[in-house]
Image (cartoon, rainbow, N blue to C red):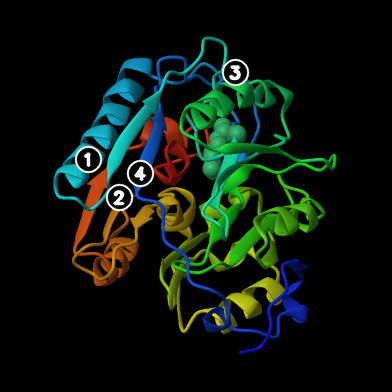
Amino acid sequence: MTPVFAKAYNPSEVHFMSDDCENRNEPRKVLMCTPEHFSIIDVKNIYMQGQKGNVNVDRANVQWDAIRNSYLALKNQKIIDDVLVIDGIEGMEDMVFIANQSFPWVMWNGEKIAIMSRMRHENRQNEIPYVEDFYKDHGYKIVELQSKYHFEGMGDMIAHPGKRLLYGGYGFRTDRAAYDEIARIVDAPIITLELISEHHYHLDTCFLPLNHSEVLIAPDAFTPESLNIIRRMFEGVYEIPEEEAIEGFACNAHMIYGQNKNSSAALVQRGNPVSLNILQQSAAQVLEIDTTEFIKSGGSVFCLKMMVY
Ligand code: ARG
């Protein structure tokens, strides 16, 4: 096996394959944050333009409840182990997007750590202590970044399924330089991917691994070098139509990785026929749900949950 060092790689420096990386168990618990204080009060991404004050709170609550109920049904079927919920905080309009404030990880020795994000927008940085409390209550060691660079958690850093290998998106919210420190903390390689389209300001809006060898992407999101390395790391790369990636937020689906297709499931915004078809090849159950109130703020299913250990 080629030795793979724990550092942040530019695409041109990657000389290994995912099989050269150590195996990893996927997290099996879902964490959500209640939506009662969700609203749009400013413009943090292109989707939020013209949406100030435009959230239908009742509808957002109904949509969020339906997602939680879908997860509870998957828990009943033992596809996931648990559904945990923390309370949204008054005045924290984006806290419901619980993928962003942190990145949980298990170290070689089994220790659970939570790397806390350094959010680009100050009003979102205020969410961090509340999320930190959750991790403290659940036996995690809290890790604060020492460098000053921005990092937006699982919104921008996504793991290769079943491997100690990460992909780090940068360009809008997270700084490339943050990944040097993070690679040392997680003791794993991070392949950095440059994002170039405003509609794909977080990696989770354009990059969704389906299993160890296939990935769903929005090709317009990436530089040619980043696209190249994605094509090298995955045997099957499915490019979805632009309208499904942008209006439909289809890459922001949530793929729950099981041992095989039968124990895998996915949740996706409804009305994305091409993506739905692709997801159905990898997961026996694909639940179509409605997240349109949250899409107004630039997020769908993937952003509304955090997978934790
Ligand atoms: N309004 C939120 C923001 O701009 C949306 C975050 C979406 N989260 C995500 N993981 N893509 O910060």
Q: Position of residue 26 (x, y in %)?
A: 41, 58
Q: Which badge, 2 or 4, comes first in the chain's sequence?
A: 4
Q: Nearer the viewer, mark 3 or mark 2?
A: 2
Q: How far is mark 3 from mark 2, CA to CA?
A: 27 Å
Q: In the depicted view, which residue is nearer to us: 151 or 171?
A: 151
Q: Position of residue 129 (x, y in %)?
A: 62, 22
- Vertically, is 147 above or below 188? above
> Which SS class for mark 2?
strand
Instruction: Answer whether residue 32 is visible to the viewer in this image.
Output: yes
Mark 3 highlights which residue? Answer: 41
Q: Which badge, 1 or 2, comes first in the chain's sequence?
A: 1
Q: Which badge, 4 or 1, comes first in the chain's sequence?
A: 4
Q: Are marks 1 and 2 in contact (CB under 8 Å)?
A: yes
Query: What residue is at 46 percent from the left and 32 percent from the top?
Result: 138
> Which SS class for mark 4?
strand
- Vertically, is 43 above or below 244? above
Instruction: Answer whether residue 94 is visible to the viewer in this image.
Output: no
Dot label at residue 70: 1
Q: Which badge, 4 or 3, comes first in the chain's sequence?
A: 4
